[in-house]
Image (spheres, rainbow, N blue to C red):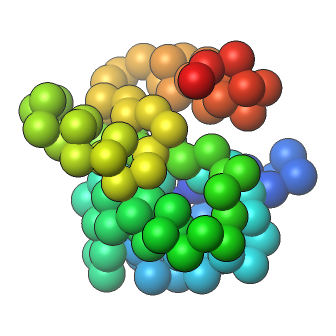
């Protein structure tokens, strides 16, 4: 993925970096799959800014990362991510987790 993936009314929106992704989230209020390591602003920082703003509490934020460290997952969840997915060759897990969160099947 070349940017932040945002699902808005069944349309995929892509942002080139964290700053553009954050602006897009505030404007469109989509569910968001946020990549952890992109230019401009980390995915954790995007999650934190969205949650601290109070403007979009209903948005589901899913952090997508290749970082398998437990500390990264804890930091992301503390910053407001609803779930953290470690990148793997199996994209099926990403899709299933996003769908479950959008349907409110996960806490």
Q: Position of residue 30 (x, y in %)?
A: 73, 57
Residue farthest to the right? 9
Q: Is residue 80 left or right of residue 92?
A: left
Image position of 72 with respect to 51: above or below: above
Q: Is residue 41 left or right of residue 32?
A: left
Q: Nearer the viewer, residue 54 or 4?
A: 54
Identity of the residue drawn at 26% across and 59% down: 37
Q: In which image quadrant can residue 84 be found? A: top left
Do we see residue 6 in this rendering? yes
Q: Residue 102: x percent and y percent? A: 73, 33
The C terminus sits in image quarter: top right
Q: Is residue 43 visible?
A: no
At horizontal 77% and vertical 70% (from top left) the residue drawn is 28
Please give the count of numbered marks on the rendered protein. 0
Is residue 67 or residue 58 the one in the foreground?
Answer: 58
Query: Does residue 7 appear to the left or right of 2 in the view shown?
Result: right
Residue at x 52%, y 81% (from the top left corner): 20
Is 83 located above or below residue 47 in the figure? Answer: above
The image position of residue 77, as x and y in percent, is 35, 41
Residue 57, position as x, y percentages in the image:
66, 57
For residue 84, above or below residue 45: above
Q: Indicate whether 68 appears above or below 77.
A: above
Residue located at (60% from left, 52% from top): 32
């Amino acid at each position: 993925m070349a940017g932040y993936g945002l699902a808005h009314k069944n349309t995929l929106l892509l942002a080139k970096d964290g700053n553009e992704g954050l602006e897009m989230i505030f404007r469109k209020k989509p569910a968001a799959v946020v990549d952890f390591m992109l230019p401009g602003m980390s995915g954790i920082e995007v999650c934190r800014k969205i949650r601290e703003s109070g403007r979009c509490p209903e948005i589901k934020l899913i952090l997508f990362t290749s970082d398998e460290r437990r500390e990264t997952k804890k930091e992301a969840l503390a910053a407001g991510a609803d779930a953290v997915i470690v990148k793997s060759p199996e994209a099926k897990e990403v899709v299933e987790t996003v769908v479950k969160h959008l349907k409110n099947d996960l806490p």
